[in-house]
């Protein structure tokens, strides 16, 4: 390849990277904006909107501090399998298995207390993952 082609290829790849980063940033900004709007419009006892908004941010690892506030408020309003498991998932992703296990056990306890017919197999799998992470020294 000639130097001109190499330079053009390098500039083209750089432009693509910058453009894709811009799109990702725009998408993340939209997620944060929509999540905040949903939280602002939620009623004082709407634990589900708080948890859903937190989940969107936590999954993308954006606006996490505010998302954790929403999640904690959701748990305060109505601790349940969904929001407690989400808090466990957050801790597991951050490699804090002890904290993750605490929230997974709370989720399982609430779930089985609410109904004996509800399965906690998915929660048990998450606890296994946390224990495996713990074995790795986290």
Image (tube, rainbow, N blue to C red):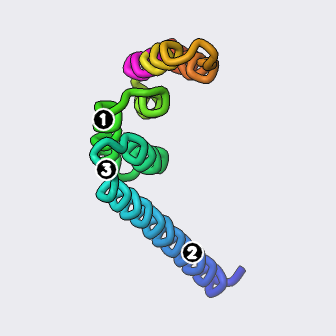
For the residues labelled 2 and 1, say whether their Cβ atoms are less than 8 Å apart.
no
Name the front one of labels 2 and 1: 1
Q: Quadrant of residue 2?
A: bottom right
Toward which corner of the image does residue 46 lie, by quadrant? Answer: top left
The circle drawn on residue 137 is: none
Q: Nearer the viewer, residue 73 or 9?
A: 73
Task: Farthest residue to the right: give it.
Answer: 1
Left or right relative to 15: residue 29: left
Pick whichever, 53 or 128, lies toward us.
53
Residue 44, percent across and down?
27, 46
Q: Give the quarter of the figure containing the C terminus.
A: top left
Image vertical order of residue 63 relative to residue 96, above or below: below
Label 3's element?
loop
Q: Earlier in the sequence, mark 2 or mark 1?
A: 2
Question: Which residue has dot 1 on it?
Answer: 72
In the rendering, at what x and y percent does residue 116 appear?
59, 12
**According to the image, label 3 marks what residue?**
43
CA separation in Å, label 2 and label 1: 39 Å
Q: Residue at x 40, y 62 (%)?
A: 34
* Crowding near the residue tagged with mark 2, few <14, some 14–19, many ≥20 C-alpha atoms within 10 Å: few
The prevailing secondary structure element of the residues shown in magenta is helix
- Regarding residue 137, the answer to whether it shows in the image is no
Decide which of 112, 67 is in the foreground and name it.
112
Identify the element where label 2 is drawn: helix
Q: Secondary structure at mark 1?
A: helix
Residue at the image position 32 percent from the left and 40 percent from the top: 68
Magenta residues, start to end: 98-105
Residue 104 counted in the magenta span:
yes
Q: Is residue 13 visible?
A: yes
128 part of magenta stretch: no
Q: Earlier in the sequence, mark 2 or mark 3?
A: 2
């Amino acid at each position: 390849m000639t130097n001109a082609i190499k330079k053009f290829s390098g500039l083209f790849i750089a432009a693509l990277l910058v453009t894709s980063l811009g799109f990702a940033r725009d998408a993340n900004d939209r997620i944060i904006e929509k999540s905040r709007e949903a939280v602002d419009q939620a009623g004082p006892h709407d634990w589900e909107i708080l948890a859903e908004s937190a989940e969107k941010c936590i999954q993308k690892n954006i606006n996490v501090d505010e998302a954790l506030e929403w999640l904690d408020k959701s748990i305060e309003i109505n601790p349940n399998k969904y929001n407690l498991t989400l808090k466990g998932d957050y801790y597991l992703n951050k490699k804090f298995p002890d904290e993750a296990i605490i929230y997974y056990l709370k989720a399982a306890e609430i779930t089985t207390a609410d109904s004996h017919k509800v399965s906690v197999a998915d929660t048990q799998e998450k606890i296994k993952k946390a224990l495996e992470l713990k074995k790795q020294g986290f």
